Image (tube, helix red, strand yellow):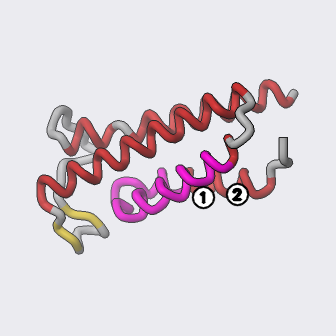
Amino acid sequence: MWKYLTYATAIALTIHGVIHFLGIGVYFELIEMADLPYKTTLLGGAVDVGDAGIRVFAVLTAMAGVGFVASAVALVTGWRYWRAMLLAVTVFSLILTTLDWTVASAGALANLAILAGLLVMPRL
């Protein structure tokens, strides 16, 4: 049973990580998405970071995506420090999604669910 739960968790983490890459496409103006419009502001429009700033933000978001995929691989392969890696990337992602709350509120909630899961999940 744990094996299936491990794989299901890894798939969910990978999907969450891949979603982080949408910011690169939108904020580098490579794709257009109705649910994720190009903008140069964070914190609900309160802070204008400009074109360069939003691209730096997109790169940071993609780094979080890489972290989630790496955490999924670490979990499946049984790497000893997968929990610490997942905790760090989830907190980082939560900060980023909070900064872009208007379009990333679902991501913030997913991060909170991951943190709750880490808290209640038995140590493996």
- At 51% from the left and 39% from the top, the residue drawn is 16
**Residue 97 locus on image (x, y percent):** 42, 57
- Residue type of the residue flagged with mark 2: Ala
Viewport quadrant of the N terminus? top right
Mark 1 and 2 residues: CB-CB less than 8 Å, in contact?
Answer: yes
What stretch of residues is rendered in magenta?
84-109
Q: Secondary structure at mark 1?
A: helix
Crowd rating for badge 1 (residues with CA inside 10 Å; few <14, some 14–19, many 20+): some
* Residue 76 horizontal side relative to residue 51, left or right: right
**Residue 120 locus on image (x, y percent):** 80, 55
Q: Is residue 77 magenta?
A: no
Image mark for residue 31 = none
Instruction: Residue lying at the far front in this picture: please name it.
Output: 80
- Residue type of the residue flagged with mark 1: Leu
Q: Nearer the viewer, residue 83 or 101?
A: 83
Q: Quadrant of residue 49?
A: bottom left
Instruction: Residue lying at the far bottom in this picture: please name it.
Output: 46
Q: Which residue is identified by label 2?
A: 116
Prevailing secondary structure class for the magenta stretch in the rendered image? helix
Q: Quadrant of residue 11?
A: top right
**Residue 46 locus on image (x, y percent):** 23, 74
